[in-house]
Image (tube, rainbow, N blue to C red):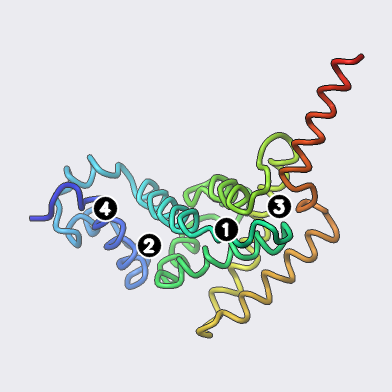
């Protein structure tokens, strides 16, 4: 009998395996419970829905990236930092590529709904922005998050078809997408330190008036 502390890991692991082998749309909660060696009641107490299981997997990927932030990137450009963070994310998902593909296929093709939906992309992209030391606060932060979600989804298509060991095609696609976004939208401009200085100056000016 699995230990209760292992339930979350077992459920997510077996759910991903089933998504990869038989398809996420065809996988029931009963299938997941049986594969994990749990009762439906135990599954329900841990994760009340398939959406909750996906959210747990997304959180796992977030944490892998956040636990592997390279301090040597602190002095690099915003684009280089974000490139490193997102490539770490794709690397973390590599063992589960077929599962991710199946999960995405089972949900809507509408980008906005997907970004706000079961994979919680906006929440994850907020953490990726912070991991790259880019502010995700305020109106500008919200625009950055939405822009990064679109970039991520665009590169995801390349990643699905990238079978190389070094993910060369994925890296090239990500670099290209970040370059276009930086050139056309400028959403990477204004690193956190500069933004704080600007906010402070504005507050002083407002006080003086």
Q: Which mark sits nearer the N-terminus, 4 or 1?
A: 4
Q: Which mark sits nearer the N-terminus, 3 or 2?
A: 2
- What residue sits right under mark 1 in the picture? 71
Whole-number angstrom distance, CA of label 1 to CA of label 2: 37 Å
Whole-number angstrom distance, CA of label 4 to CA of label 1: 41 Å
Mark 4, other Cα within 10 Å: few <14 / some 14–19 / many ≥20: some
| Drawn side of residue 65 relative to residue 21, left or right | right
- Residue 118 in picture, x, y percent from top left: 47, 49
Proximity of marks 4 and 3: CB atoms separated by less than 8 Å: no
Depth check, mark 4 against mark 1: the one in front is 1
| Drawn side of residue 114 relative to residue 42, left or right | right
Residue found 36% across the figure and 70% down from its top? 20
* Quarter of the figure with residue 161: bottom right
Number of the label disc, if any, that sits on residue 147? 3
- What residue sits right under mark 2 in the picture? 24
Is residue 188 among what the camera can see?
Answer: yes
**Which structural element holds mark 3?**
helix
* Quarter of the figure with residue 27: bottom left
- Residue 26 in picture, x, y percent from top left: 34, 63
Whole-number angstrom distance, CA of label 3 to CA of label 1: 25 Å
- Which residue occupies the foreground of this view, 37 or 133? 133
**Which structural element holds mark 1?**
helix
Whole-number angstrom distance, CA of label 4 to CA of label 2: 10 Å
Whole-number angstrom distance, CA of label 4 to CA of label 3: 34 Å
Mark 3, other Cα within 10 Å: few <14 / some 14–19 / many ≥20: some
Q: Which mark sits nearer the N-terminus, 3 or 1?
A: 1
Depth check, mark 3 against mark 1: the one in front is 1
């Amino acid at each position: 009998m699995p230990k209760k502390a292992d339930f979350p890991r077992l459920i997510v692991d077996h759910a991903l395996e089933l998504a990869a082998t038989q398809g996420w749309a065809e996988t029931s909660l009963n299938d997941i419970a049986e594969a994990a060696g749990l009762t439906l009641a135990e599954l329900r107490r841990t994760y009340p829905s398939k959406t909750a299981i996906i959210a747990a997997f997304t959180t796992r990927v977030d944490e892998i990236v956040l636990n592997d932030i390279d301090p040597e990137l602190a002095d690099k450009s915003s684009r280089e930092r974000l490139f490193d963070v997102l490539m770490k994310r794709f690397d973390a998902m590599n063992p589960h590529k077929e599962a991710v593909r199946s999960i995405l296929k089972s949900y809507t093709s509408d980008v906005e709904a997907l970004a706000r939906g079961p994979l919680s992309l906006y929440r994850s992209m907020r953490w990726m922005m912070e991991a790259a030391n880019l502010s995700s606060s305020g109106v500008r932060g919200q625009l950055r998050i939405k822009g990064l979600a679109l970039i991520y989804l665009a590169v995801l298509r390349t990643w699905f078809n990238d079978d190389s060991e070094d993910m060369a095609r994925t890296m090239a696609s990500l670099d290209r997408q970040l370059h276009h976004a930086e050139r056309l939208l400028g959403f990477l401009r204004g690193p956190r330190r500069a933004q704080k200085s600007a906010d402070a100056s504005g507050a002083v000016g407002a006080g003086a008036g």
